[in-house]
Image: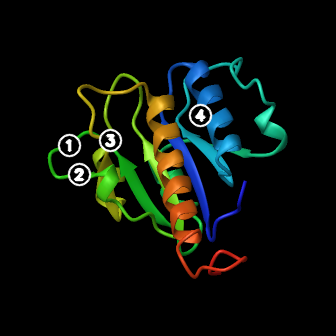
Amino acid sequence: MCRTRGFFGIGIVAPKDEKNVGLLWRGAHCFGADYIFTVGYRYSRVVTDTTDAGKHTVLFDYANVEDLLKHLPRRAELVGIEIMEEALPLPAFAHPEQAVYVLGPEDGSLPEAIIEACACVVQIPTQFCLNVAQAGTVVMYDRWAKAMTKNRAPGAGEEGGR
């Protein structure tokens, strides 16, 4: 897989099911995330991490929203993934070079403090909501696919225009 420019992390606020953390971790490993994270986790163990992603993709556990916001990487843009009327549809979204994507819990929404801190809020246009790990994987795929399309543009050359 071609490595894209920049970096990104992705995480879930207050995940209640360890399976979703494991599935997001596996997707992060597949699509080249630099790290994943949880905020105020409620799970006990990760059984769905079948690629042993922990050897390749770091997991940070933040105690709460303030802890996450305090430890955002420099220059990273916080991007919320949430179903809301004012959210930008994912197909129209241009991913920042340095991004931290954050998804709400399986049984709720992103906290207002996170939404206020976001540079942008994006939603995946579907008939109804996706599972949180599926939504995260769709966002990572979209980032990867758009980067691959950009890197393979006519005249990009062997190095993908970097």
Under mark 3, the amino acid is: Ile
Task: Please state which amino acid type lies under the numbered disc 1.
Answer: Met
**Which mark is nearer the camera, 2 or 3?**
3
Q: Is residue 51 visible?
A: yes
In the shown orientation, is residue 65 left or right of residue 63?
Answer: left
Q: Determine crowd level at label 4: few under 14, some 14-19, many 20+ residues with C-alpha closer than 10 A.
A: many
- Discs 3/1, front: 3
Measure the alpha-carbon separation of dots 2 and 4. 22 Å
User: Which element carries disc 1, helix, strand or loop?
Assistant: loop
- Say whether disc 3 or disc 4 marks the residue closer to the N-terminus: 4
Q: Mark 4 points at which residue?
A: 24
152 lies above or below 45: below
Instruction: Report which quarter residue 78 is drawn in.
Output: bottom left
| Gap in angstroms between the C-alphas marked 3 and 4 | 16 Å
The label number, if any, that marks residue 87 in the structure image? 2
On the image, numbered disc 1 is attached to which residue? 84
Q: Which of marks 3 and 1 is nearer the N terminus?
A: 1
Q: Name which of mark 2 and mark 3 comes first in the sequence.
A: 2
Instruction: Please tell me the numbered disc located at residue 124.
Output: 3
Task: Name the residue located 72 percent from the left edge and 26 percent from the top edge.
Answer: 49
Does the residue at mark 2 contact the one at mark 1 (Cβ under 8 Å)? yes
In the rendering, which numbered label is found on residue 67? none
Q: Distance between the residues labelled 4 and 1?
A: 22 Å
Distance of label 2 from label 1 (alpha carbons) = 5 Å
Three-letter code, disc 4: Leu
Q: Which residue lies furthest to the left in this view?
A: 85
Residue 10's spot in the image, x, y percent?
55, 47
